[in-house]
Amino acid sequence: MTLTLISHHLCPYVQRVAIALREKRIAFEQQYIDLAAKPSWFTAISPLGKVPLLRLGDEVLFESAAICDYLEDAYPDHPLHPASPVQRAKHRGWIEFASATLADIWGFETAPDAVAAQRKAAALRVKFLHVEKALRDGPFLNDPFFNGAAFSLVDAAFAPVFRYFDVFDVIADFGIFDELDRVQIWRAALASRPSVQDAVTPDYAARLHLFLAKHRAYLHQLTEGMATNV
């Protein structure tokens, strides 16, 4: 059975699934669509009109959490969830926390002015302060990933979160990660992971800049200022 991941180039939830598939060493194909001009075949099979979708022959799965749970159940080799039910529940909670962080990132990247951007940056810093505490209290202490030495779905969920800042940090420093040593170590470890690197196309940064320009975002205004000063 051929697995096909229906994708959008910038979607962090698509990235989660792509990372999980690669970490579990599952062969798959990837098909990209334009969410601004959704093809009729896509709207016919996507109840929410969103990506990712995972085609399994004649079956279609939607929502990244459900897809990742399916992959864990159907492909038990190379598990990405802890064996302990309590730890699995905690990990699912942190995956939801990553989704809440993505909501704040949306507000930050589409902020129309400096005041709105600073407000969203402050909200993001609060989020990452919680993450820093979790990393200091958990098995991360001596190992590179959220659950210690083993890569997990929490890592897959946060890798796309950090990827945004690979672009944002070049534009301006909002101090979001200042003194968050564990978060920065984790971010670097995830960025070096092949599954994370391969979860996007090489033009990811360029596409994100086009997104900022389309939304007339404050971050784009800063890039225009940078270009003027060159």
Image (spheres, rainbow, N blue to C red):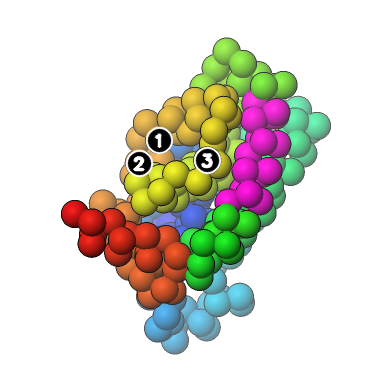
Q: Is residue 111 visible?
A: yes
Point out residue 15 in the picture as x, y percentages from the top left corner.
Answer: 46, 52
Question: Closer to us: mark 1 or mark 3?
Answer: 3
Mark 2 — residue?
197
Callout 1–callout 2 Cβ contact below 8 Å: yes
Residue 208 shows in the view: no
Magenta: main secondary structure:
helix
Residue 191: numbered disc? 1
- The residue at which mark 3 appears reads as 175
Q: Residue at x 67, y 21 (%)?
A: 136
1 or 2: tag closer to the N-terminus: 1
Magenta segment boundaries in residue numbering: 121-135
Separation of marks 2 and 3 at Cα, in angstroms = 25 Å
Task: Provide residue 77's location: percent of width, then percent of height.
Answer: 53, 32
Q: Amino acid at mark 2?
A: Gln
Could you tell me which residue is drawn at 32 percent across and 54 percent down? 205
Between residue 54 and residue 87, name the one nearer to us: 87
Residue 99 located left or right of residue 158: right
At mark 1, the secondary structure is helix
Helix, strand or loop status at disc 3: loop
| Direction from residue 123 to residue 27 in the image, left or right | left
Distance (Cα) linking label 1 and label 2:
7 Å
How many residues crowd around disc 3 within 10 Å: few (fewer than 14), some, or many (20 or more)?
few
